[in-house]
Image (spheres, grey):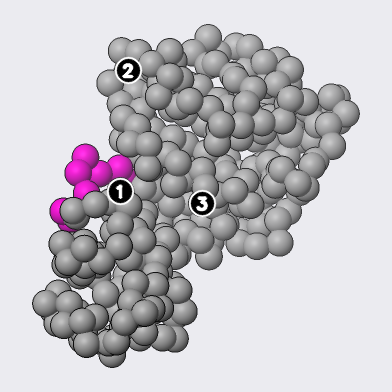
């Protein structure tokens, strides 16, 4: 197909929507991308080739799916909106390397899907324009389930992308930053204006690449407890780490034992949660875990 026929052009997008009588559902966060350059940047960031696979979540009418099909060897797309399934099958009919599934990615058994659709594929990346209202649950499911992923390249709300990539001490740094950076190495690819979508969202977007780690950057005694300590430390951002931890783990005790354990972890009690690195959180959680504080 020529570039003129690409799904992502404004003309073709409007033609497909009109021909199928499609109406956008605000509840599903549907915003279709109509900018070729942004699509190329997304696909390029994923580092795909004919030996690799791509999993797309929320393909819409297939603008990004088409670019993935032209680059990757195997493409699987999961779409929650039943009304889009016949449209996708029609517009993607020229591409034999694409499978379209109807379903909610939060309910799909992704390990089973990988066994079925990506058997024999060397490396797989998730590449998607995610609905903003459900970005974090989807990304955390992808990371926590420890799928055999190389990269996760997604368009998400700019503010959320900045939080994921934030460094300790910055206003954007929080429990989400640590969770994402525990499982991956995030890098902002580009900022995307709201004008390149139909319909236009009310917020700016960003493309972020999460290079999935083979091993976490720190060693923790218990992952669940590590994240519990992180969450507790950010419960009230204006409070010190000591006050936040006391509320969660030492509510019925004095501060003496807490401060002793903080000292053992090398952390000054008056520091706030946003100043601690992921390495410091790992050491802190290990000290608390070994002291049987849970």
Nearer-the-camera pick, 35 or 60: 60
Q: Is residue 193 visible?
A: yes
Nearer-the-camera pick, 126 or 16: 126
Q: Quadrant of the N terminus?
A: top right
Q: Is residue 146 above or below residue 199?
A: above
Q: Marks 3 and 1, how far apart in space?
A: 14 Å
Per the image, is 198 magenta?
Answer: no
Task: Decide whether the magenta segment is chiefly helix, strand or loop.
Answer: loop
Q: Marks 2 and 3, how far apart in space?
A: 27 Å
Work out whether mark 2 precedes mark 3 in sequence or the reverse, and give the earlier one: 2
Left or right: where 168 falls relative to 29:
left
Q: Residue at x 58, y 27 (%)?
A: 78
Question: Label 1: which residue?
Answer: 183
Q: Nearer the viewer, mark 1 or mark 2?
A: 1
Say which element carries label 3.
helix
Say which element carries label 1.
helix
Say which element carries label 2.
loop
Q: Position of residue 77 (x, y in %)?
A: 55, 25
Q: Is residue 284 above or below residue 119?
A: below
Nearer-the-camera pick, 177 or 2: 177
Q: Residue at x 36, y 28 (%)?
A: 124
Label 1 crowd (10 A; few <14 / some 14-19 / many >=20): many
Nearer-the-camera pick, 105 or 10: 105
Q: Which label number is shown at residue 136?
A: 3
- Point out the stretch of residues depicted in magenta: 211-219
Q: Position of residue 121 (x, y in %)?
A: 32, 17
Q: Nearer the viewer, mark 2 or mark 3?
A: 3
Question: Label 2: which residue?
Answer: 121
Q: Marks 1 and 2, how far apart in space?
A: 22 Å
Work out whether mark 3 precedes mark 1 in sequence or the reverse, and give the earlier one: 3
């Amino acid at each position: 197909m020529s570039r003129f026929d690409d799904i992502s052009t404004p003309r073709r997008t409007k033609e497909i929507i009109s021909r199928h009588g499609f109406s956008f559902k605000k509840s599903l966060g549907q915003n279709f991308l109509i900018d070729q350059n942004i699509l190329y940047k997304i696909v390029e960031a994923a580092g795909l080739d004919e030996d690799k696979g791509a999993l797309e979540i929320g393909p819409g009418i297939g603008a990004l799916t088409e670019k993935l099909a032209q680059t990757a060897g195997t493409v699987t797309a999961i779409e929650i909106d039943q009304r889009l399934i016949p449209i996708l099958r029609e517009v993607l009919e020229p591409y034999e390397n694409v499978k379209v599934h109807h379903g909610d990615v939060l309910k799909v058994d992704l390990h089973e899907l990988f066994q079925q659709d990506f058997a024999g594929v060397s490396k797989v990346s998730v590449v998607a324009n995610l609905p903003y209202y459900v970005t974090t649950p989807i990304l955390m499911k992808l990371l926590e389930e420890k799928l055999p992923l190389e990269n996760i390249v997604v368009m998400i709300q700019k503010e959320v992308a900045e939080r994921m990539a934030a460094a300790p001490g910055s206003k954007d740094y929080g429990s989400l930053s640590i969770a994402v950076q525990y499982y991956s190495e995030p890098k902002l690819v580009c900022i995307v204006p709201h004008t390149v979508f139909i319909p236009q969202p009310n917020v700016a977007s960003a493309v972020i690449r999460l290079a999935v780690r083979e091993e976490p950057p720190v060693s923790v005694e218990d992952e669940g407890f590590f994240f519990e300590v992180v969450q507790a430390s950010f419960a009230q951002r204006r409070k010190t780490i000591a006050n936040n931890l006391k509320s969660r783990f030492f509510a019925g005790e004095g501060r003496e034992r807490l401060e002793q354990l903080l000292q053992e972890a090398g952390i000054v009690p008056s520091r706030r949660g946003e100043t601690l690195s992921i390495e410091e959180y790992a050491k802190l959680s290990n000290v608390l875990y070994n002291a049987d504080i849970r």
